Image: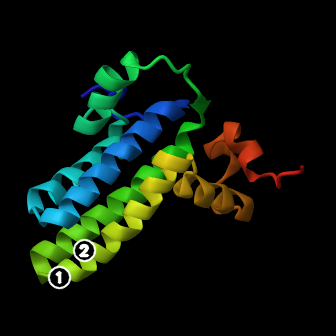
Amino acid sequence: MSPRLFSFPHPVDEVSARLVATGVVAQVVLYLATGWDLLLVLLAWGFVARVLTGPTLSPLGLLVTRVVRPRLGAAPREVPGPPKRFAQGIGAVLTITALLTVLLADSGTVAAGLLVALLVAASLEAFAGFCLGCWLFAGLMRLGVVPAATCEACEDLTRPRRE
């Protein structure tokens, strides 16, 4: 496989990111309403695919970038890619853990709790434009846990805001 396949876009179009988050919100709500395990598998696959390849292998990412986004008139708004990838990684951990608790421990309650946390984070991104994972990424950069070289474009994310 091409090394380009396993890359994440940098920068990322914020409009596309918010549309993907909207799709995640819809999938989580549908799963919580129906309990269909296939939806949980699709959610987990989507997050893992987006972490590894951006939208390239993600059905939701492809739908957004190839079908929905081109039809919108909004200008692209570029934001750094590494924080968005980190946020997708958090989504992957939450959905894989939820899937495993359903399949191995038959614990729909634990899975639902994890998915409600995901629903809150995805809703913040989709409807308010606040990326919780990006905020955590910036905090980890401030603490030195994430090296500055990981995202030079993120430098301004780690500085305290002055009004």
User: Which residue is under mark 1?
Assistant: 107
Q: Is residue 88 left or right of residue 111?
A: right
Q: Is residue 33 above or below residue 66?
A: below
Tell me the tag on residue 111.
2
Q: Is residue 58 above or below residue 139?
A: above
Query: Which residue occupies 46% across, 46% down?
Result: 126
Three-letter amino acid code of the residue under disc 2: Ala
Residue 43 placement (x, y as % from top left): 24, 53
Q: Is residue 161 left or right of residue 29?
A: right
Query: Which residue occupies 20% across, 57% down?
Result: 30
Residue 82 placement (x, y as % from top left): 54, 43
Q: Is residue 106 above or below residue 26?
A: below
Is any atom of residue 87 visible in this view? yes
Three-letter amino acid code of the residue under disc 1: Ser
Query: Which residue occupies 19% across, 61% down?
Result: 31
Residue 94 placement (x, y as % from top left): 34, 66
